[in-house]
Amino acid sequence: MFNIDYELNEKIHAIIINPYLSLEELNANCALIQKYNIKNVSTSLNFLSHIKNVLGNYKLNINSLISYPFADLPFEFIDEFVCYAQDAGATGIEYTPNFLNLSKNNLNNFASEIESINASELKVTIIINKSKLDKELFEKAIKISLELGITNFQFGDGFGPAISNVDIVEILKFVGIQNSIKVVGGIKTLSQVIDFFDLGIDCIGTSNFDEIFKEIKRI
């Protein structure tokens, strides 16, 4: 049984990225983060400064998504985006690399991208959607990331089918339990959250955190 007052508010990461949120809705999300004592948030560059300003006196890790979800950030702009995120108050970067480089066997380009991100002082999480890659490219992406010192991985990006238990078992074997694994996509209930943690996942990300914490409060 989890210590609900302590562990789940750290293990459940709030995702705030909906570009159609109104100012009122964005502020309501910030209020919910405080209400549930959530310690980790993933958000866009556009929302980053506002969340930081509203929750400035609240101890919070704010991870900024870069090149998400389309891996469409040219290499030349990576450092600028990372610096912008850091100046705006981000404590971490969650990054989707350019997988086309892997498909073209441009392994050095793929590695250089991750090296550039990892050179910052911020914690780096590499985002991989396992369902979108064949086995060979998936394993290459993991291997290169590990060799470059990446220790935080997110599997799933909210696009495509939710990650399966079979996928989780494969991921844990390949990545290793010594690294941090986060799962995102289709997580809407507390039972899903507990199932993932029982399998060995370190944390989950969801935009449905309000519904999940309401379930927790009812227990």
Image (cartoon, helix red, strand yellow):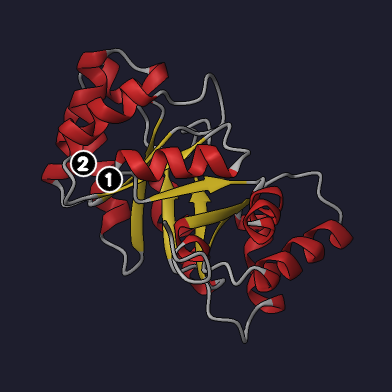
Callout 1 touching callout 2 (CB < 8 Å): yes
Q: Give coordinates of residue 100: x percent, y percent.
A: 35, 21
* Closest to the observer, 20 or 106: 20
Q: Residue furthest left?
A: 147
- Mark in the foreground, 1 or 2: 2
Q: Looking at the picture, which amino acid does disc 1 mark? A: Ile
Label 2 packing within 10 angstroms: few (<14), some (14-19), many (20+): many
Secondary element under disc 2, as helix, strand or loop, is: helix
On the rendered structure, is 153 left or right of 204?
left
Q: Give coordinates of residue 168: x percent, y percent.
A: 32, 30
Identify the image quadrant of residue 183. top left
Residue at the image position 51 percent from the left and 55 percent from the top = 12
Secondary element under disc 1, as helix, strand or loop, is: helix
C-alpha distance separating marks 1 and 2: 7 Å
Residue at the image position 71 percent from the left and 69 percent from the top = 50
Label 1 packing within 10 angstroms: few (<14), some (14-19), many (20+): many
On the rendered structure, is 174 left or right of 52?
left
On the rendered structure, is 2 left or right of 112?
right
Question: In the displayed structure, would residue 141 be above or below residue 3?
Answer: above
Q: Give coordinates of residue 98: x percent, y percent.
A: 37, 31
Q: Identify the mark nearer the N-term, 1 or 2.
A: 1
Q: Looking at the picture, which amino acid does disc 2 mark? A: Ser
According to the picture, the residue beneath numbered tag 2 turns out to be: 145
Q: Residue furthest bottom?
A: 57
* Closest to the observer, 207 or 66: 207
Identify the image quadrant of residue 214. bottom right
Which image quarter is the N terminus in? Answer: bottom left
Residue 74 visible in image: no
According to the picture, the residue beneath numbered tag 1 turns out to be: 114
